[in-house]
Each structure stands twice: as structure tokens, then as C-alpha cells.
């Protein structure tokens, strides 16, 4: 999905709550040169950075909370897999939306993945909110136009299937 919306390898991409995930490795593999990973956990960022070795120096690492991110420059693509669904209060969700609005340039894209309506209602001992594309769209409001969505069964390391909703939104010009 990122490849479909990132207009070139210079696109500025942020992986919000990227943690130790391999997405940043894959983006570098594909030649993206302006990648930022933000996570509330410095330890998780450290795992990814150490794993990448020298390549990690090409990435911007930001220890910060998705609810209060204020980036120095706007991004072309905001990616979030499995972070937004942990925000279970209106206050937290709207704080996240304020971060998104501040971070994403007009014309840019949001690629977001959350637990689907048939997914688990808790994860890592925490409550989650579940979404389909319509519910995400309703929350994001008319400032963000739904471009594409799909349901996917995610397999956990233990082999359990979890329903995810993936959706792409554009902030229209
Ligand atoms: C379930 S993991 C998902 C990691 C990665 N996005 C992936 O798909 O593999 C959730 C990540 O979100 C981070 N996180 C949780 N709440 C956050 C917040 N409010 N702001 C930024 N990161 C947060 C956690 O530290 C963790 O790395």
C-alpha cells in the first residue's frame, strides 16, 4: 500500500509506532531515502536501529507519543500498523488526529492498519478498539478520503489468526 501511494523514493514516510518492526528495513531495501520511525518506546527503536547497523544512520528515529507528535517537517505518508487501535478514549483518539493533521501534508496519504471488527478485543493485556474502513473513515472525517481498504488475517508468532483492517486515506488538495 505504501508503494502504491508514495510518489517516489524521496517521499517522506513516517512509521508511527513502528517499534521494532521490519517495515523500516523493507523501505530501505526498496530505496526509500527519507524514512522516520516514531515510537513511545526508546527500547523498541533501539532494537530496530541496532538490527539495521550502519543503515540505521539513514533513518530518523523519534522517541515520542503518537498523540503528541509535532514533526519539524510534514510527511507524504503516515503509516500506522497496530497503534491507533490501542487508543480507547475520545480524548486520546482526537489527540492522535491532531498529530496526524499537523504531520501530513495536503495531498499526502495515511496507511493505517487496526484490528478488524472480527479481531481481538484485547492485545497484550490492553483493551483495543476495532474498526472496519467505514468506522475509520467516520472517525477521520471529511478531511481524509478513503482510497482503498482490505481485510487481512494476520498470523501472530504463536500462529493465531487476527483479523486486521488495512485502509488508505488521502488528505485531498
Ligand atoms: C503492536 S506494536 C506494533 C509495532 C509495529 N507497528 C508493527 O506493526 O509490527 C505497537 C507499537 O506501538 C507503540 N506504541 C504504543 N502506544 C504508542 C503511542 N501512544 N505512541 C507511539 N507509539 C506507541 C509500542 O511501543 C509498540 O512498538
Image: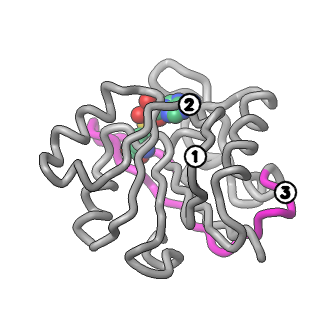
Residue at 53% from the left image edge and 76% from the top image edge:
5
Q: Residues within 10 Å of mark 2 (few under 14, many from 20)?
A: some
Pick whichever, 27 or 114, lies toward us: 27
Q: Residues within 10 Å of mark 3 (few under 14, many from 20)?
A: few
Reply yes or no: does residue 141 show up in magenta.
yes
Q: Position of residue 113 (x, y in %)?
A: 54, 53
Task: Decide which of tag 3 and tag 2 comes sooner along the chain.
Answer: 2
Residue at 34% from the left image edge and 41% from the top image edge:
156
Q: Badge 1 is on which residue?
A: 71
Q: Position of residue 152 (x, y in %)?
A: 48, 59
Task: Decide which of tag 1 and tag 3 comes sooner along the chain.
Answer: 1
Pick whichever, 127 or 25, lies toward us: 25
Position of residue 125 relative to residue 131, above or below, is above
Q: Secondary structure at mark 2?
A: loop
What residue span does the magenta drawing correspond to?
Answer: 140-166
Q: Position of residue 34 (x, y in %)?
A: 39, 63
| Magenta stretch, main secondary structure class | strand
Q: Badge 3 is on which residue?
A: 141
Q: Badge 2 is on which residue?
A: 65
Task: Decide which of tag 1 and tag 2 comes sooner along the chain.
Answer: 2
Q: Quadrant of the C terminus?
A: bottom right
**Alpha carbon separation for disc pair 3 and 2:** 22 Å
Position of residue 132 relative to residue 156, above or below, is below
Amino acid at each position: 500500500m505504501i508503494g502504491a501511494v508514495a510518489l517516489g523514493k524521496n517521499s517522506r514516510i513516517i512509521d508511527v509506532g513502528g517499534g521494532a518492526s521490519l517495515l523500516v528495513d523493507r523501505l530501505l531495501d526498496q530505496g526509500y531515502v527519507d524514512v522516520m520511525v516514531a515510537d513511545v518506546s526508546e527500547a523498541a527503536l533501539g532494537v530496530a536501529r541496532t538490527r539495521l547497523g550502519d543503515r540505521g544512520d539513514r533513518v530518523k528515529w523519534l522517541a515520542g507519543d503518537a498523540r503528541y507528535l509535532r514533526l519539524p517537517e510534514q510527511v507524504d505518508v503516515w503509516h500506522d500498523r497496530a497503534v491507533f487501535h490501542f487508543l480507547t478514549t475520545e480524548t486520546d483518539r482526537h489527540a492522535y488526529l491532531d498529530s496526524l493533521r499537523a504531520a501530513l501534508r495536503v495531498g499526502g496519504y495515511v496507511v493505517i492498519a487496526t484490528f478488524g471488527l472480527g479481531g481481538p478485543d484485547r492485545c497484550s493485556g490492553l483493551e483495543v478498539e476495532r474498526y472496519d474502513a467505514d468506522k475509520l473513515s467516520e472517525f477521520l472525517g471529511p478531511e481524509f478520503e478513503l482510497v482503498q481498504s482490505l481485510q487481512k488475517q494476520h498470523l501472530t508468532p504463536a500462529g493465531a489468526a487476527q483479523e486486521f483492517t488495512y485502509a488508505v486515506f488521502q488528505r485531498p488538495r
